């Protein structure tokens, strides 16, 4: 079998994104940003419905003290450093973060959907 029921999709999302802390990371292609002012951000998610969930509040990254480059991908990890990557996808659009810029993911914009 290769099709998950909606119940199982919702359970997987709940077990991995709601019952334990998860952290959002920013990437330049395949490499996570590594500047001193950068840090993964804790995120929380709404109760999954129909195999989908989204962040329940804005996710604000620190104001960049260095050039972070072009943010092209977003990842979700189970730890604030190192850890296991749970999800990874292209950002909706690439955004260059220069000194004094801040990356923000608005509420409900980080959608995680299981197909």
Image (cartoon, rainbow, N blue to C red):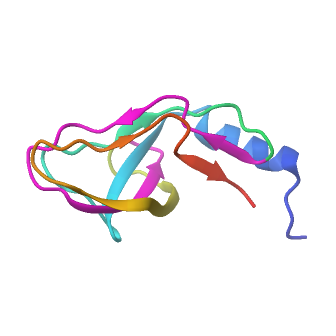
* Image spot of residue 36 (x, y percent): 12, 47
* Image spot of residue 114 (x, y percent): 71, 56
Compared to residue 53, the image places residue 90 above or below, namely below
Q: Residue at x 8, y 50 (%)?
A: 66
**Residue at the far top in the pictured view:** 57
Compared to residue 81, the image places residue 34 above or below, namely below
Q: Residue at x 77, y 42 (%)?
A: 11
* Image spot of residue 45 (x, y percent): 58, 34
Is 76 situated left or right of 115 in this image? left
Q: Specify the quadrant of the image occupied by residue 32.
A: bottom left
**Residue 74 in magenta stretch:** yes
Is 102 situated left or right of 113 in this image? left
In which quadrant is the N terminus drawn?
bottom right
Compared to residue 64, the image places residue 94 above or below, namely below
In which quadrant is the C terminus drawn?
bottom right
Q: Which residues are magenta?
A: 51-79
Is 72 situated left or right of 70 in this image? right
* Number of disc labels: 0
**Residue 34 in magenta stretch:** no
Q: Residue at x 48, y 45 (%)?
A: 78
* Image spot of residue 20 (x, y percent): 56, 33
Q: Residue at x 77, y 39 (%)?
A: 49
């Amino acid at each position: 079998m290769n099709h998950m029921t909606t119940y199982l999709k919702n359970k997987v999302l709940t077990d991995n994104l709601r019952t334990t802390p998860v952290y959002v990371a920013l990437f330049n292609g395949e490499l996570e940003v590594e500047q001193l002012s950068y840090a993964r951000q804790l995120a929380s998610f709404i109760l999954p419905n129909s195999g989908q969930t989204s962040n329940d509040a804005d996710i604000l990254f620190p104001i960049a003290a260095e050039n972070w480059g072009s943010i092209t991908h977003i990842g979700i990890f189970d730890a604030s450093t190192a850890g296991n990557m749970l999800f990874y996808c292209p950002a909706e659009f690439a955004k260059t973060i220069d000194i004094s810029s801040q990356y923000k993911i608005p509420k409900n914009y980080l959608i995680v959907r299981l197909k």
